[in-house]
Amino acid sequence: MSHPFYLDFDLESWARLRASTPLTLAEEDIARLRGINDGLDMEMVEKAYLPLSRLLNLHVQARQQLAVVTDLFLGTPASPVPFIIGVAGSVAVGKSTTSRVLQALLARWPHHPSVELVTTDGFLFPNAVLQERGLMERKGFPESYDRALLLDFVSRAKAGEAELEVPVYSHVRYDIVPGEHRVIARPDILIVEGLNVLQAGGSGAFVSDYFDFSIFVDADVADIREWYVRRFLTLKETAFREPDAYFRRYSGLTDEEAKEIALDIWTRINEVNLVENILPTRDRADLILEKAGDHSIRRVRLRR
């Protein structure tokens, strides 16, 4: 895919843009940040993510300097607000790993030590609401999110509010945890990760209006399908076996039975959402990370 609005880099060309950026993560950090079956290693951090952290650091510094100029012009005290980064992409494409790696790298730069990561899972409607509205089979589609609540959160974050509450989502229970919230205390950088965070359309504001920089994690649909099935098989042996797991009924399946169910879920739900809602937002991103079949990043496209 070539696009006139993007500069196109293979991995080696992109890696050279790291310049003298130091590697601040150790092997144990990489192991902790690695997602299920995604194969993150030190080489990928050095070649793909270090140059990206350098680029983002430059953007953050420029935005901070602009804020100082504006405050000086207005004659008002400095009022720092978070630099907001949106990370979008399909289920199982590895956007969560990308977000965690960027959080870890960016927090080690001196200009912005406080970096928070929020996933949009916490803004899904509770299962009871989805069931009432007949949307359980549409979980992850735009209409399954409390978009007003998500928009309110990012707009208040961008306004520099001191503390914000984020609902807590349990992947084991596959539901919002009633009464639980996480507090976000005005970070230097806020990463917002989710399937549809670049969604446009409709009237009024939408979430990506508040992003200072946006990233889309991309891959061939056939590769993502394979990653989804492999992840499902791994979860069958791990998280699905927990006593309160929503998908505990799948933990006793054979691998062949699990593959069949995973492919059915992917085809009926996740691939439809990817093709209809997520992929159309790709060209709204400031940067596209394109993955190969082994989860490695093979190309980077940067909006001019």
Image (spheres, rainbow, N blue to C red):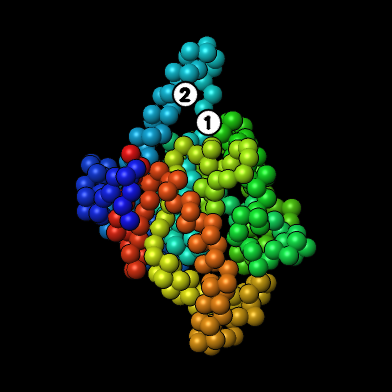
Query: Where residue 205 sits in the image (x, y, percent)?
Result: 60, 38
Pick whichever, 104 or 195, lies toward us: 195
Query: Where residue 150 sits in the image (x, y, percent)?
Result: 63, 45
Q: Is residue 116 visible?
A: no
Task: Specify whether 175 is left or right of 296.
Answer: right
Q: Identify the residue under disc 2.
A: 67
Residue at image point 48% right, 65% down: 92
Residue that extends furthest to the right in the rendered view of this protein: 132
Pick whichever, 116 or 274, lies toward us: 274
Q: Are marks 1 and 2 in contact (CB under 8 Å)?
A: yes
Disc 1 or 2, which lies upstream in sequence?
Answer: 2
Query: Where residue 248 sits in the image (x, y, percent)?
Result: 64, 77
Asked if residue 238 is positioned above or below residue 105 in the image, the reply reads below
Is disc 2 placed on a helix, strand or loop? helix
Residue at image point 35% right, 61% down: 291
Quadrant of the rendered image containing residue 31: bottom left
Query: How many angstroms separate mark 1 from mark 2 (CA)?
Result: 9 Å
Task: Specify whether 297 is left or right of 153.
Answer: left
Quadrant of the rendered image containing residue 247: bottom right
Q: Is residue 70 visible?
A: yes
**Numbered tag placed on residue 81 in the rendering:** 1
Task: Specify whether 122 is left or right of 208.
Answer: right
Q: Amino acid at mark 2?
A: Ala
Residue at image point 54% right, 86% down: 257
